[in-house]
Image (spheres, rainbow, N blue to C red):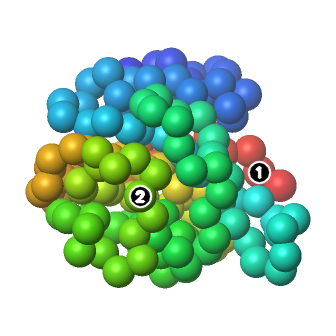
Amino acid sequence: MQVNALCEGEPNLIANLANISAILFDRLANINWAGFYLMQDPIHGSVQELVLGPFQGKAACIRIPVGRGVCGTAVATKTSQLIEDVHAFDGHIACDAASNSEIVVPIIINDEVVAVLDIDSPSIGRFDQDDLNGIETIVSFIETIWPKK
């Protein structure tokens, strides 16, 4: 409800994503990062990549290739990722060594991933199916306010 209220009538995507990051970081217990990575067309070579967007937490990796790490896997598979222990995830990218579990949900517009919502925790097993359902509900809302091409 708070996400909806803050975004209502505001057309600026970056402002909305920044506020959503702040709400998640403030309201979710035991997390150390919450934010967005946005898809960008290739500029470094020939692969699409995610680029850091609005977030709350410590400085983060700026670019993540599609298919690499938890975020890149979410893009490549177009599926949410609920990772109990990131150290057991093959190809995990450690932007913050304090992160131990992660949840990533792709934002899909016209069958294309345009961004991901990424949340990290310092605790192994922090996230469960209820968390995933809640984050997917927020992403469904974001998809309704995403600018149409």
Residue 98: give x, y in percent of width and height.
Answer: 28, 45
Residue 5: give x, y in percent of width and height.
Answer: 46, 19
Crowding near the residue tagged with mark 1, few <14, some 14–19, many ≥20 C-alpha atoms within 10 Å: few
Crowding near the residue tagged with mark 2, few <14, some 14–19, many ≥20 C-alpha atoms within 10 Å: some
Q: Element type at marker 1?
A: loop
Disc 1 marks which residue? 148
Amino acid beneath label 1: Lys
Mark 1 → mark 2, Cα distance in angstroms? 33 Å
- 129 and 147: which is toward the camera: 129
Ranked by sequence position, the earlier of labels 1 and 2 is 2
- 102 and 58: which is toward the camera: 58
The residue shown at (32%, 56%) is: 103
Quadrant in which the N terminus appears: top left
Q: Eyeballing the image, is 108 above or below 48?
A: above
- 101 and 96: which is toward the camera: 96
- Asked whether residue 48 appears in the rendered view, the answer is yes
The residue shown at (69%, 34%) is: 13
Q: Element type at marker 2?
A: loop
Amino acid beneath label 2: Ala
Q: How many marks?
A: 2
Left or right: residue 70 compared with residue 89 = right
Disc 2 marks which residue? 94
| Mark number, residue 127 | none
Closer mark to the observer between disc 1 and disc 2? 2
Marks 2 and 1: in contact by CB < 8 Å?
Answer: no
Q: Eyeballing the image, is 41 above or below 138?
A: below
The residue shown at (45%, 64%) is: 93
The residue shown at (52%, 75%) is: 68
